[in-house]
């Protein structure tokens, strides 16, 4: 494997974790879009009223300047105020109509464009772009992003409606400048203000994008919690229900002393043990998320560790007719890690392949030394099973993931705990899979003093 491929793999994993997040679920996306539509309509109405009160305050201020102020040259401002007031009235009226409720984005864009372009037209009529009020445009864009912090593309569209014609006007003014002094004044004045306004728009759009991303994550987490609670209740209820049925059937027998077959006792004990394992796994995952995982580091040889895991799981593997091929080289260098926790990683990955595939598959375990971006061992646990979709791969390490096949008690805790262990060791974990072509789970473990080179 080339160093370029490894570097791209790490970059892709980093990008997916910090920017893309998980693949959008259609069900979550539909619920989110319904909420966003209602939220947008409500906040748009609030924005219209807010701008209306701002307009009234400016009208009162300009009235005082016109009638009682020292300068009485504000007549054109009342024309601008009248046009802006008409824009608000139209927007408010359209929002009450059924058409407006179906197309709130059009109303938002129209109102924003009407506000910003009116002042631009007034500045052009006055013959001086310096009269354009950048503070007013800044207030409009920041107010929009604060009151209506969704649909960043719509915010960008409304901003470009002003920025594009304003840029063209500045270019024309620069080309028509008669001398270098006029050009310099234009750059120091209008062009500097344009750059300032451009960055205001960038900050506003970024804030809307981040808020919307956060809200979507909340909807996603809410659905995951609902799925998680359903899975927990299902997995805890089944053993209890089975025990109740057994006890009720025994109580139908006459007499004070009721004989109980050994098989029934073993069945009840197995159900109780499954409940205990599930509860302990839940507590462990929760504590690891809150407090972090404490490692007891020592020098660990991976080949004998994997052999021990395979021996432990041998009865389960024979029951499902599954073959495990330990292809790890005995010459692999030891690593500084927690022997028990790394044992659990391999155990959980093999159990995952066993639980979510039909009988008769082959599982192989490999490892190799990589040197980019740093020296590390790259271990992989692959199978020739049913595989997964891209959406399932993106969510497989979530605490709430259940997998696409559910033949055994499982709510995704094993893979989530494996991820916690690998990340506590300073490594990375991921999966490569295609539906119908098997899955390969891989993880990396840093090497402090590499002493082995793969031929």
Image (spheres, grey):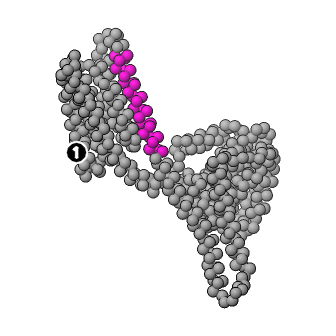
* Res 13 → quadrant: top right
Residue drawn where x is 39% and y is 24% of the image:
195
Asked if residue 411 shows in the view, the reply is: yes
Residue drawn where x is 32% and y is 47% of the image:
41
The reply, left or right, for residue 103 in relation to residue 30 is: left
When the figure is inspected, residue 93 is found, relative to residue 403, above or below; the finding is: above
- Which residue is at the front of the view, 397 or 208? 208
When the figure is inspected, residue 283 is found, relative to residue 63, above or below; the finding is: below
Percent across and percent down for residue 206 are: 44, 36
Percent across and percent down for residue 325 are: 74, 58
Percent across and percent down for residue 309 are: 76, 58
Asked if residue 393 shows in the view, the reply is: no
* Res 125 → quadrant: top left
- Which residue is at the front of the view, 36 or 68? 68
SS for callout 1:
helix
- Which residue is at the front of the view, 126 or 135? 135
The reply, left or right, for residue 307 in relation to residue 5 is: right
Per the rendered image, the range of residues in magenta is: 186-214
């Amino acid at each position: 494997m080339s160093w370029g491929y490894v570097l791209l793999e790490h970059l892709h994993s980093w990008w997916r974790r910090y920017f893309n997040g998980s693949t959008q679920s259609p069900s979550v996306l539909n619920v989110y879009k319904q909420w966003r539509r209602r939220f947008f309509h409500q906040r748009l109405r609030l924005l219209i009223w807010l701008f209306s009160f701002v307009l009234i305050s400016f009208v009162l201020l300009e009235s005082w300047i016109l009638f009682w102020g020292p300068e009485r040259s504000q007549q054109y401002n009342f024309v601008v105020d009248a046009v802006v007031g008409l824009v608000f009235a139209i927007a408010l009226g359209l929002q009450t109509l059924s058409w407006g409720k179906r197309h709130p984005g059009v109303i938002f864009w129209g109102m924003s464009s009407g506000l910003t372009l009116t002042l631009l037209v007034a500045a052009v009529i006055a013959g001086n772009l310096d009269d354009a009020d950048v503070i007013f445009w800044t207030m409009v864009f920041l107010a929009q992003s604060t009151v209506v912090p969704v649909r960043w593309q719509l915010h960008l569209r409304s901003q470009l409606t002003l920025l594009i014609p304003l840029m063209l006007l500045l270019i024309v003014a620069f080309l028509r400048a008669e001398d270098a002094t006029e050009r310099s004044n234009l750059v120091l004045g209008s062009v500097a203000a344009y750059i300032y306004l451009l960055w205001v728009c960038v900050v506003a759009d970024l804030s809307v994008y981040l808020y919307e991303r956060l809200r979507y994550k909340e909807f996603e987490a809410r659905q995951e919690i609902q799925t998680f609670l359903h899975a927990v209740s299902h997995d805890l209820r089944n053993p209890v229900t089975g025990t109740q049925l057994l006890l009720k059937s025994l109580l139908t027998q006459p007499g004070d002393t009721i004989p109980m077959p050994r098989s029934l006792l073993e069945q009840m004990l197995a159900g109780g043990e499954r409940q205990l394992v599930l509860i302990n796994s839940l507590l462990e995952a929760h504590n690891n998320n809150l407090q972090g995982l404490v490692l007891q580091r020592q020098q660990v040889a991976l080949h004998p560790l994997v052999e021990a895991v395979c021996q432990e799981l041998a009865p389960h593997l024979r029951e499902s007719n599954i073959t495990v091929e330990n292809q790890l080289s005995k010459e692999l260098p030891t690593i500084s890690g927690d022997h028990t926790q790394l044992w659990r990683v391999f155990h959980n990955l093999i159990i995952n392949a066993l639980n979510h595939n039909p009988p008769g598959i082959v599982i192989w375990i490999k490892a190799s030394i990589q040197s980019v971006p740093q020296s590390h061992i790259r271990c992989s646990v692959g199978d020739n099973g049913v595989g997964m979709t891209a959406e399932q791969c993106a969510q497989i390490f979530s605490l709430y993931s259940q997998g696409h096949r559910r033949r055994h008690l499982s709510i995704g805790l094993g893979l989530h705990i494996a991820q916690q262990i690998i990340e506590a060791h300073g490594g990375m974990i991921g999966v490569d899979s295609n539906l119908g072509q098997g899955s390969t789970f891989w993880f990396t473990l840093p090497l402090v003093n590499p002493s082995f080179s793969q031929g």
